[in-house]
Amino acid sequence: MNETMHEITSGLYLGDIFAARNPSLLNDHQITHVLTIARGSLGLLSNTLDATADGGKAFKHLQIELDDLPDEKLLERLEEGVQFIDSALSPSGDTTEPGKILVHCLQGMSRSCSFVVAYLVWKKNISVSQALEIVQEKRKKARPNAGFYRQLQEWERRCRDSTD
């Protein structure tokens, strides 16, 4: 069983740097988009991102620079990440098929998990705890740090307020 990435919901994968650095794994899973949640150089990913997804198009990529520290300003970056995930999973103008996205950080535990949880809270109108349960059902080690969890709870409040 592949432990570097897990499909959380249809087309939405959560994984680590090893999954992101493996173009054949990405192509095997028909990944079209990669969301990197890490600070610093993408040198580790350059070979992967220079490779092409099946169909000859380059992987669409977004990097959000955050460290895995409780006082990082996750909340300020969630909307950008959630919108990128949503655009990946929505059919685009040139195809009626939705894409597939890998959301990753270094270990696929805290930063990337936080963005996947935020997306599920926003898209499915569920609580952070419900979203985290969905994620952990597929990727046992997924666990946002305490500061990220508090910010996700604020994200949940904002999402709920915007639908009221």
Image (cartoon, grey):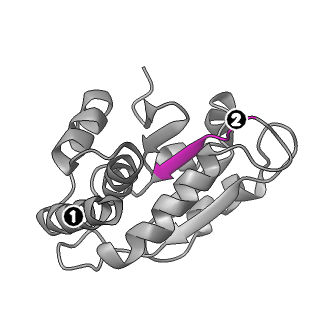
Q: Who is closer to the viewer here, 164 or 68? A: 164
Q: What's the distance in space between the residues labelled 2 and 1, CA to CA?
A: 37 Å
Q: Quadrant of the C terminus?
A: bottom left
In which quadrant of the rendered view does residue 149 lie? bottom left
Packing grade of label 2 (10 A; few <14, some 14-19, many >=20) is some
Classify mark 1: helix, strand or loop.
Answer: helix
Packing grade of label 1 (10 A; few <14, some 14-19, many >=20) is some
Residue at image location 44% in from the left, 69% down from the top:
79
**Percent x, y of residue 27:** 70, 35
Residue at image location 50% in from the left, 39% down from the top:
12
Q: Who is closer to the viewer here, 125 or 34? A: 125
**Percent x, y of residue 4:** 43, 37
Could you tell me the amino acid type at mark 1? Arg
**Percent x, y of residue 80:** 49, 70
**Percent x, y of residue 16:** 42, 48
Q: Who is closer to the viewer here, 131 or 17? A: 131
Q: Is residue 149 above or below residue 66?
A: above
Q: Mark 1 points at which residue?
A: 157
Which of marks 1 and 2 precedes in the sequence?
2
In which quadrant of the rendered view does residue 126 lie? top left
Q: Magenta segment range?
A: 97-103
30 left or right, relative to 10? right
Q: Mark 2 points at which residue?
A: 27
Q: Who is closer to the viewer here, 59 or 1? A: 59
Q: How many marks?
A: 2
